[in-house]
Amino acid sequence: MASHYPAHETHFVHRIGWLRAAVLGANDGIVSTASLVIGVAAASAASGDVLLAGTAGLVAGAMSMAAGEFVSVSSQADSERADLETEKAALEKYPEEELRELAQIYEERGVEAALALQVAEQLTAKDAIGAHARDELGLSEIATARPVQAALASAASFAAGAALPLAAAAMTPIETLMPVVAAVSLASLGLLGAMSAKAGGAGKTRAVIRVIFWGAAAMLVTGAIGSILGTVL
């Protein structure tokens, strides 16, 4: 699809829907699976038990992310549809009032009254519900909720993220498993932060520091809990 923007302009808002779900899923996949693997390994579990726990975490996490994302985004989509139905009914019953309301919106944005009314009339003639959805309700095609897309992106990205610490655990002796998994996971988080910042047009440094800090914190806490419970039990 051709871009609506001039060649010298690059915008990233059209990526919001899938980017948020993909980054959240991958981040959760890396952090939760690495933390689970490290926590189980810290409890002096055998290598097979660690891998079993990590695999179960990958499958359960991917399904949970997909279900949670689908339900939450579906709720958003339901709200959007309800607002659009309300607006359609208002346009049918009170067309003049709705026209003045649209013109008032443009006036508040700095358009002169006469021109605002002319713009409102022309947009209403072409696509009344589209004009009100965009300018009154703040809904647009870019930001429209897409439950299936969000669910699939979350599940796939979670599984991809979780596969990294799980692969590191599978290829590492149990004696060095925890530091290797931690190192691989933190490096993966840093790369994810940099990639997501680039895709979203944001600064990389803050994004990388943010994901590494919280990932390290989660691994330290679960490792400590696993060590304590392993000693007690």
Image (spheres, rainbow, N blue to C red):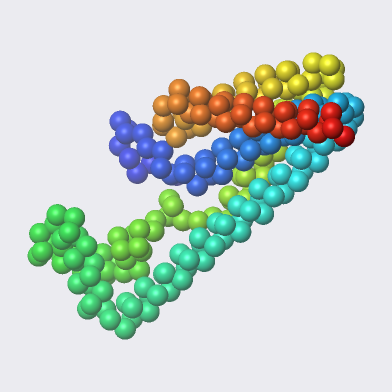
Tell me what residue is drawn at x 32 percent, y 77 percent. 91
Q: Residue furthest bottom?
A: 93
The residue lying toward the viewer, choosing from 220 and 58, is: 220
Number of marks drawn: 0
- Residue 15: x %, y % from top left: 47, 42
In the rendered image, the vertical position of residue 174 relative to residue 115, given as above or below:
above
In the rendered image, the vertical position of residue 127 relative to residue 95, given as above or below:
above
Tell me what residue is drawn at x 85 percent, y 20 percent. 174
- Residue 182: x %, y % from top left: 69, 22
Q: Residue furthest front?
A: 232
In the rendered image, the vertical position of residue 138 relative to residue 3, given as above or below:
below
Q: Is residue 207 left or right of residue 230?
A: left
- Residue 128: x %, y % from top left: 31, 69
Q: Could you say which quadrant of the image residue 26 lies in? A: top right
Tell me what residue is drawn at x 62 percent, y 26 percent. 216
Q: Is residue 208 left or right of residue 167?
A: left
Q: Is residue 169 visible?
A: yes
Location of the N terminus by quadrant is top left
Q: Is residue 130 left or right of residue 187?
A: left
- Residue 180: x %, y % from top left: 73, 18
In the rendered image, the vertical position of residue 82 relative to residue 170, given as above or below:
below
Q: Could you say which quadrant of the image residue 165 lies in? A: top right
Location of the C terminus by quadrant is top right
The residue lying toward the viewer, choosing from 59 and 221, is: 221
Q: Is residue 40 visible?
A: no
Q: Is residue 122 left or right of residue 176?
A: left
Tell me what residue is drawn at x 72 percent, y 28 percent. 224
